[in-house]
Every structure is written in C-alpha cells, then in structure tokens.
Amino acid sequence: MGKITGFLEIDRKVESYAPVEERIKNYREFTLPMEEKDVKDQGARCMDCGIPFCHSGCPLGNLIPDFNDAVYRGKWEKASEILHSTNNFPEFTGRLCPAPCEEACVLGINEDPVTIENIEKNIAETAFKKGWITAKPPLERTGKKVAVVGSGPAGLAAAQQLNRAGHQVTVFERDEKPGGLLRYGIPDFKMEKHVIDRRLELLKEEGIEFKCGVHVGKDIKADALKNDFDAIVLTGGATVRRKLPIEGADLKGVVQAMDFLGQNNRRVDGIKDLGEEILATDKDVVVIGGGDTGSDCIGTSFRQGAKSVSNFEIMPMGTPDRPKDQPWPFWPMRLRTSSSHKEGAERFFSISTKKFIGDEKGNLKGLITSEVEWVTVPGQRPQLKEVEGTEKEWKCELALLALGFTGSENTIAEQLGLEMDNRTNIKASELNYKTNVPGIFVAGDQRRGQSLIVWAISEGRQAAHHIDKYLMGESALPLKGEGDLPRV
C-alpha cells in the first residue's frame, strides 16, 4: 500500500492553523488546506504492514490502506468510492473524529502514524468539489415506513442506509434544524454548518423527509408514532448532563457547557431570540472538565472576548507519550492539547472544585478548589483524596460545566415500555439493535452511552441492516467490514 519505502522517506504532515490572533476574531474554520502533493505524499507513508490494525482501530471499519493507496496514485474518485463504502459522512469525521485509527496504525509503534484523518477530509472535500457526490435515490420503494428519532450522526446514517434499501424514511428532530450535536454542540470553528447543510440537501433529494421542531414524547406521543410506522429507530443521544452537586451550583453564572455552546451556535446562525444570553465577554472564565466539550468551551470563550480562561481537570496530567500500561494498538490516555488550548487557556490538573461563591445578588464571583490525588489500593478502584492545605480561591464570573453525560432522557422509553440499563441507556443488543418491544430499535449514544462520532455512524449503519432485515426478512445493507453492496 502506498509507496513501499514512503514511510522511510516522508515525514508526517498535517494541516496547519491560522495564527491565534486572527482565528479568534471569528467562528470560521481555521485549518489551512494542504497542497495536493502533500496529501498524496502522506498517502505514500501507508506501509505494506501485512495486517492493517487501523481497521480495528476504526469503529466504522474504514478501508484505510485502500483509500490511502488510491490517493497516493492520484485516483481521487476511487478513493472517494472506497471511503464512502463504509462511511456515510467522511466530511464530518475528517473534521471531528479523534482518529483512533491513527493510534492503531502499525507505523505508529515507533514512528509518527499516517495522517489518516487529514487524508479522509481531503478525499471528501475533493469529491464534493469535483461533483462526484450526488443524490442516489433508490430505484424502487418497499412500501415500508421507518421513523428515525434524532438527527445526529447515528440518526442520519441510519436514515440514509434505510432509504437506500427503499424504505420511506422520516427523521424527527426536536431542534430547529437537523444535525443534533453536530449543529448545536460542535462550534463552527471546528465545523461550519454549511458542511452539514450540503449533506442534508443530498439526503432530502434522495427522498428522506425531515420534520424539525417536533419533540417525540411531547409533541407526538411515542406510541402514536409506533402506530404510524412499520419500525422506529431511536437515536436521540446521551443528553442528560452530569451535574456538580456542590454549594453554589445554582448561582447565576454556573452554566452547563452544552447550554453555552448551543446558544452560541444559534447566535452564529443568526438566530435573535436566544433567551437570557450566556456570554464570556470580559469575564474570568473557568471551564471544568478536560475533554473535547471543555476544549470547545475554551475556544468559544476566547472568541466571545473572555478576560481569561482556566481549565480544570480532576485527573492527573497525562504524558505526551503512550503510557506503558496502555500498549499499541489500544487507545492511550495521553495528554492531548487541542487548538483551543493553544489559544491561551491555562490548564490545571488534579484539581477539584469544592464550592461556588456568589455576591449579594446571586451572581457567581468566584470558586474554591483543592488539589487532589488518586490513591490506588490493590483489588479496588482508585480513590480520590483531597490534599490537605491546598484550598485556593479563584476569581470567576462564568463557570462552564463540561462534565460529560450520564445517559439518555427516558420519556420515550417510558411511553413505549422500553427496558433501560443501569446507566439510563436504552437496552438493545449489539447483535441486532432490537429493544424489548418489537419494531423498536436503538442506536448510537442512546444505546451505548456517550461516545465518538465514528461509533454513532457505525451504530446507525449497523442498526439499519437489522431494521431492513426485520422488515424484509433479509438485507443487502452492509454490516461492518463488508462495505456497500450495489443499491436497489
């Protein structure tokens, strides 16, 4: 695959960024595209490794060496066909995926891995630019109707696959526009929303119907939906935010990250009626949580004109290199520094917030923290212990809670009588994505819990196969590792 000696001759290269002082003035994407020659050179680094562990690292089972080789040889249309055979939306994943495939790259054992994610993005954008990605409606319809509840990546993937099988698909979305967290969680500087709209137009041309502003379980009772459709797939995501139950958590200025990010995305989209505005402008901001959502809050805060941004993480600072107890090809918990971190945030590790402090009007004005350490006892889970004498007071007018999600909302599950697991996810087997109620399926974060975009798309595709089989007795829709078969 690629050039036989390419990995020995060519260094890893990825897209560069516009300077910080320029990019924080707006919400546009700020990566600087690579020259075509550079992308082909990166494809050339894909070595003839024998067993491509990148396949197992990718939840979608993308045929990575195959499209890398096609790019190296300048066969961009072939590369697009290979990539789209396993991934419905590479323009999304090429921007947003943390690239577990790269951590599993064989070259990454002792060298820098192949820049798979950048290659994926370039393939998708080249295909759109050349007009190779077009609507492909099915030639025949089955007469079966399927409701998809939720329009995030899992829902969109399931909808497109089921539509390809010839079923009439209707997607229900409670927000104003489709996209789920892609639209109202991911900042525009990571993915501008015209990227979503471009794909949605194709899905509509293929015959998929979108009904937005419809909250299934409230505006439409779930059991009524069940009577109108032959099958339902729930892809609403894990949307219950984790709280921080400490003194002062109800002060004005203590805000859930997704409320902050969602409002800002609507503001960027030109929506005027936002309710009470949440802004970081001229404030000392503390982002509590060290994951991707916390990083997104940091970048958004700087663009809103925050006075300062600090980032708290309760876990110890990771190492830049792979930890010894997390060997290749597994995903390592190493220190990851995002583009937003590099925009000026100060990061603090092994720190816990103990109390929020308010003024006489109920506004947040500060918080108190202490340093912590994790104590390991053989045979037990690590225990969190406060380090005595380390209490510190911080000035803070806006605290953003980026603590992750605890599970999915259960209104629909209650109305349909669906079984839940102990994490408030809807129970369904990974073997067929069926719930305990016939005709009801579930996929994505609503089944597996908070996870990656590639897992969401993978689950949507897998669920579509089993729904098609449930409706028709058999299915030509591909399972992971098969790629797309000829469409009806």
Image (tube, grey):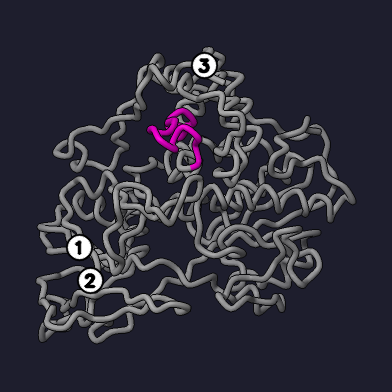
Task: Kindly indicate whether the residue at mark 2 contacts the one at mark 3 (C-beta within 8 angstroms).
Answer: no
Task: Kindly indicate whether the residue at mark 1 contacts the one at mark 2 (C-beta within 8 angstroms).
Answer: yes
Instruction: Say the numbered circle drawn on residue 351.
Output: 2
User: How far across and how far down the image is residue 109, in percent?
Assistant: 44, 38
Q: Residues within 10 Å of mark 3 (few under 14, many from 20)?
A: some
Residue hosting label 3: 4
The amino acid type, in three-letter code, at marker 1 is Phe
Q: Residues within 10 Å of mark 2 (few under 14, many from 20)?
A: many
Numbered disc 3: secondary structure: loop
Query: Which of the pair 102/437 is nearer the observer?
Result: 102
Is 106 magenta? The answer is yes
The structure residue drawn at horizontal position 47% and vertical position 16%, both measured from the top left corner, is 5
Say left or right for 440 vs 126.
right
Closer to the chain start, of discs 3 and 2, is 3
Quadrant containing the C terminus in the rendered view: top right
Numbered disc 2: secondary structure: strand
The structure residue drawn at horizontal position 14% and vertical position 39%, both measured from the top left corner, is 21
The structure residue drawn at horizontal position 80% and vertical position 32%, both measured from the top left corner, is 139
Residue hosting label 1: 348
User: How far across and how far down the image is residue 477, in percent?
Assistant: 77, 41
Numbered disc 1: secondary structure: strand
Q: Nearer the viewer, mark 3 or mark 2?
A: 3
